[in-house]
Image (spheres, rainbow, N blue to C red):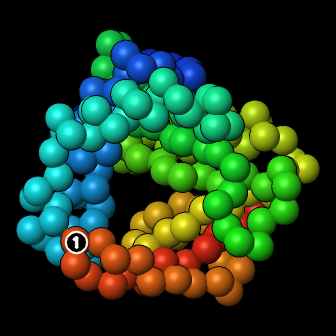
Amino acid sequence: MIEQIDEVTIRVAGATDAAGIAAVHVRSWQEAYAGIVPADYLESLDVSARTGSWTDHLRHGPEDGIRTWVAQAGERVIGFVSVGPSRDEDASRGDREIYSIYLDPGMWGHGVARDLMRTVLTELGDRTRLSLWVLAANERARHFYRRHGFHPDGVERLEEIGGAELLEVRYRRN
């Protein structure tokens, strides 16, 4: 069900946003990856555990060159995006990677993901080469990335998630 929202603010995330980010992360995975990632793995995702890892990440991320932005409606985090140095073996110095971009499933279709992506693209500028990895079976996300100027570059990898080997495709922009 799509919720009604009035105003969304995009801002840099802080450690106090960890619980909200974790809740979005878990709900989004459970909805977006149903039928792709093993169901028992999705059911095992724990908001409390993710809160701890997000707290640590948000405290130490900036010193590692990682930035995270949240989309907030009222007092509630409804989405987030994290970007940092590219982790790919063939990356050049200065290349960046979108590590994650997720929305609360009730927010899908409101343009919030578009606003998060535009924030990243504006912050990085046109000269920064940007990549991301997406599950090959996640057509909704692949379509979203293509609409924002990302294209598969032919590099693929298998990623083990919940005991299953899943194909990921790298998308690049610039």
Given the current orientation, which residue lies at the most extreme top position? 75
Q: Nearer the viewer, residue 105 or 69?
A: 69
Is 35 left, or right, of 8 in this rendering?
A: left
Quarter of the view holding residue 5: top left
Q: Which residue is mark 1?
A: 162
Quadrant containing the C terminus is bottom right
Rendered residue at 34%/38% (across/down) = 53
- The answer to whether one can see residue 25 in this image is yes
Which residue sits at x=61%, y=44%?
83
User: Horizontal placement of 92 versus 148: left or right?
Assistant: right
x and y percentages locating residue 85 in the rendered image: 69, 50
Q: Position of residue 102 (x, y in %)?
A: 41, 47
Q: Residue at x 67, y 67 (%)?
A: 88
Q: Report the front residue among 97 and 146.
A: 97
Q: Amino acid at mark 1?
A: Gly
Between 138 and 132, the one lying in front of the other is 132
* Residue 48, position as x, y percentages in the image: 17, 35
- The count of marks equals 1
Seen in the picture, residue 106 relative to 72 is either above or below; the reply is below
Q: Is residue 137 visible?
A: no
Q: Is residue 166 left or right of residue 155?
A: left
Image vertical order of residue 57 relative to residue 77, above or below: below
Q: Position of residue 173 (x, y in %)?
A: 76, 62
Quarter occupied by the N terminus = top left
Neighbour tally class for label 1: few under 14, some 14-19, many 20 plus, Cα within 10 Å? some
User: Residue at image x 15%, y 65%?
Assistant: 41
SS for callout 1: loop
